[in-house]
Every structure is written in C-alpha cells, then in structure tokens.
Amino acid sequence: MTDDGDTGDYSAMDGRLRRRRVLTGGALVACAPFADVGQAQVRDFGQVGGRAGGDVSGTLEHMLNMVHDNPGEPPFVTRYHDPAFLKDKGYTGQVPRTFLPCTVTYAAIAPGLMPPGSAQRRKVEAYAATLDLLFARAKAAGMPVYPFTDLLVLPKALVETDGPMLVTEAQRADHATLGGASLAANVLAPRTEQLLRAQIAEIFDRFPTIDGITTRFGETYLFEWPEYAGSSPARTPEEQARLIAILRDEVCVKRGKRLFYRTWDFGRVHTQPALYLAATDPVEPHPLLTMSIKHVGADFLRLQPFNQTLGIGRHRQIVEVSSSQAGIYGKNAHPYYFGQGVIDGWPRHPWIDAVERTPWRSLRELTASPLLTGVWTWSRGDGWRGPYTPDEMWVDLGEAVMRGFRDAPATPEPVLFAAAARAVTGVTDRDLPLLRDLSLLSASASLAGQDTVHMTPAEWNRRAGVLPKDFVLSGSYPQQWWCRDDGISAIDLTPVILAGKAAPVRAEKARAVADWQRIEALSRRIRLPDPTRQAFLEISCAYGRIKYALFEQIWLMQLLAAEAALSNRPLARVPMRRAIAAYDHHWGEWEALHASSPLCPTLYSDRSVKYVDAAPFREVLDAYRNQVA
C-alpha cells in the first residue's frame, strides 16, 4: 500500500484519482516545486497556432499511428499498416518506419560515391521504389504520411573519406574516431551540417508527396543496411538545438512540411526539464514544428513519473503512447489495459511524488497546457521478437480509447472505454461491466505479477550495476526488463531480501495469480457476438493466468536463491522443489494451451533473452534442479 492508501489495484479507481487544480482561467497558478524547471516554462502559444490555455472542449489537432516492425524481422501482418484503414478510423497521419537516408545518393555533393549502375546505387534505387509504392498508397487513401526515420545515417564509404571532417576541432584534438555502428558525427561540424542538409534536400526531391518527417532519435538499428553507419545525431543540448534549427529550416521553412522531432534518448533531454529547455528554447517556434515526447519519464514502463518535459518550453508537443508498452506487459498476447492509467494517471507512489515537479501527472491534466496538440500511438511493435498475437482485439481496444480521448479530451475515461469496447468487441450492455472489470484488473494484476510496488528505487539499487548518477529515474527500472518481449531471465531479487520485503512481495505475487484467475473467470462469463473474438478472449486470458502463475514461481525461486546466497547456506530444498514442480506444471499447461488453438499467441522462452543483462531463466532453473536433487 502506498502512502495515500493505494494498493496498486486499479479495479476500484474510477472516480478516485487525485488531481491538481493548476489552472484558473487558462493561467498557470504558481507552483513552488515547479520553479526549478526553468524560466517561462508554460507560455501563451497563440502565435503559432496552439490551443488556448485550459481549452479541452475541442478535438486535438493530431492523431498519428505507427507500426514499428521489429528490427531485422519481416513486417507485422496487421491492418495498421493500411493507410485506408487508418483513415477510416480517423487518424490524421501515418508514421511508417523507414530508412529515408538509405535512399540518398549524395550525387550533388559526392558524385562518385554511388555511380549509376553500381551495386549500392541499385540497392538504394530499389528501396526508394518500394517507398514510392508505400507513399502512393497513403496518398490514394488521403492519409498524410510522416515517415519515421533516422538522420545522419551515412554510407560507410562516405564515413571513411570524410570521417575527420564530421567531428569538431575539439573532438579531433581528442582523437575522436568514426566508423561502424559507433559513428558519432557531430552536427556542429560544418561538413556534417552540409551532409544533413543534402540528405533532407534529396529526400524531399525524391519523395515530394510526403507531408513531413518524424525523426528517430536515441537508437539506431541498421540490421537491414549493413553498408551504413550511424548513431544518435546529437548528444548535448547544444547539439540538439543546432539539429532542430537545421531541420526546422530545411523541412518547415524551406519546404512547408511538418517536422515531428522526437526527443527520445536515455534519461537526458527526453526526461530532464533543464536539458529539454536548453535544447529547445534556443529554437524559434514554428507552426509546422512539433516536439514528440513519450508520456512516461523513462521508457513505456510502470512505476515511473509522468514525463516532466511535457507542457513546458516554447514548442508544440505531441504525446507518444505505445500499445505494447515497451514490450514489457505481454504485447497484447493477453489483456493489459493502459487507457485509464495513461489518460487519468496510474496509482500514486511516494517515490514518484518526490520527483514530479510539473503540475500535470496524466494526459487529462496535460490538456490544460496549450502546448498539447495531439497523440500518436504505436499500435504494433515497440520491442524485439514476440510474443506474436494472431488477433488484435487488445490492440484495437487500447488504440480506440486513445482515439476517443483525442476526439473529445474532456470525456471521462469510463465513457471512452465503453464506446471503444462496444465498437471493438460488440459487447452487450449486460456484459460491459464484466469487460470493464477484466480490463482494469489486468493492469494491476500484470504489474503485481512481474514487478512490485513494495520496493523503492533506492532499495532496488542496493546491488552492483546501479544506474548512472545523471540518469533521472523514479521507479524500479533496473529489474523491470527481466521479462521484456518474450524472453524470461533470472531476475536478481537480492535487494528484496536486503530490504526485508520478501513477505509482502510473496503475498503480492499470490494476489496477482488470484486476480488472473478472476480475469479468466470473467472472460468465460462474457458473451461476445463474434465466435472468434470470444475464443480469443478466453484463450488470451488463460494465457495471462498461466504466464503469471509461472512468474510467481520464478519470484519464489529467486527469493529462495537470494536468501541462500546472502546467508551463505544451501538452497531450501523443500520449498525450492515445490516451486520447480509448480513451474514445470504451468509450463506444460502453457504448451497445451498453445497447441489447442491457432488463436493462442506464441509463448515466451526461458531459454533465450535479448538485450537483457541476465541469464535466461532456464539456465538457473537447471542449476537449482541439480542443487536440490
């Protein structure tokens, strides 16, 4: 239970969320904790077409959608790739994942780089032709398109010849190097700026029908383009300010196109108000320039503050919301309803209260800011690998709620949910309360099953490998990735033992399983008109119940292992054997569910993980078997 009496259970939160009254007649009320963010954080934005402060009566300007296909994998098979489908749903723009710099020949400034007929030129032209078809399809549907793209991704051949000119004199004095995936071209270097401007010019000359671009910033994945190198195009606020200014000039001023500039990075400009303001305030606002910012003050994770860079500064902003929520909560293989938490705010926790300084803690409160211009959803993707779901019911429900919020920001979330649920599932008025209870319970039960509200960040960091000091963070970030995507790793629970929290954590996991049993039972009481959706409803809820039964046993085993390690004693044989047996039982149950129907999503793997600094759980499980045999 948190300090304000919140257990973390979302099923009883309707009408109970705490809100701050921070606006009176559209003016910001003085708020002392907000003063350290910077000067003139919230401004009248009328001069560039922003909404009047506090006006939540009208539709937000933008509703964008993106499918982020897994890097290095075939594209998702999904309706959300179809611009006509998106247009019918009321979206105002499509953000397809592209590699626009990989269509650039640099013929104007490096004519010998890709001679006509060369293998690289043919590959570039072939890829550009595929984008022609993509953009033509959007144009035919009347759907504005803002390709999601990296910047300053350069051919390795160009890096080899121009490398020393792509960094500043100070970097050259420090013997900075370029090449491979570690390319760190500095936008402050004149040659880098020249190449960037040439990229933008050739992109819009080659694709004149696109309506703008959405920058990809913070991560660069070139699995499909090994001949190229690149990384984040700017690192310091000074570099970002220059990058934004160049893009504003090339995209908005010269060509009259929209620029959605994503601020995503790892805990700096994206989340720290002082750095955000230092990067954006030097740039003059423009009606076609919008900052794109995740709603969370970290990645799309729970137990984090609302993003403190939202609602501040000089520029229009659009908020990113992921249907897959960083690939942490099942990726829509089972219900995980994020709509209420994103719109009205998640349950409060004292460590989050301690770091939040802006007056708003949810999208609902952010509508009081004249800077907010819309929402864009990641309907599929946001992670690596699976699980892969054959039915998009949970995707459809979440995005429909967010669309409803964009259309009528003042509408209460339960009303938005009811409209979305009826449209997506055809649920009857009799069964709507059951689906509502199921959905709200899925949010609290998922969190309780794989994370914990009982540990503070300071308690989690009582181990090796703590976060860097400049990484501003609230919640239990280090351990949240243990079950990212479809990989299951061996979570280190030593900090839980050191904090004396083993008993409440064990109880929390048991409650999560009980809640998932309730979810599964609710799914069987609901009757949807579509037999396929009814079957998927029941299968996906059973899937979630089994998953969290497995996770309970993982937490029990890892707590036993941590207790043994800290006391320098052998594993407790009886409880460890019991947990292993339960784990084996539930894993067999999961495999049987998957074999029973093609509607069952793909399963997790305990034998491999991706981008998680921990061993696959199967490795430690086998060690435990040997120790207690």
Image (tube, rainbow, N blue to C red):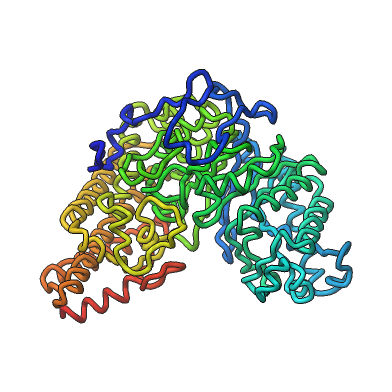
Above or below 350: residue 582: below
Give the quarter of the image for residue 486. bottom left
**Is 595 drawn above or below residue 405 in the view shown?**
below
Q: Quadrant of residue 106?
A: bottom right
* Residue lying at the far top of the rendered structure: 25
Q: Quadrant of the C terminus?
A: bottom left
Quadrant position of residue 352: top left
Q: Is residue 627 left or right of residue 127?
A: left
Horizontal relation, residue 157 to residue 396: left or right: right
Q: Residue furthest left?
A: 574
Coordinates of residue 371 in the picture (x, y in percent) = 59, 33
Q: Nearer the viewer, residue 616 or 433?
A: 616
Q: Is residue 420 visible?
A: yes
Q: Which of the image's four quarters has the N terminus? A: top left
Give the total number of marks visible in the rendering.
Answer: 0
* Residue 367: % across, % down: 51, 29
Relative placement, left or right, of 173 versus 565 is right
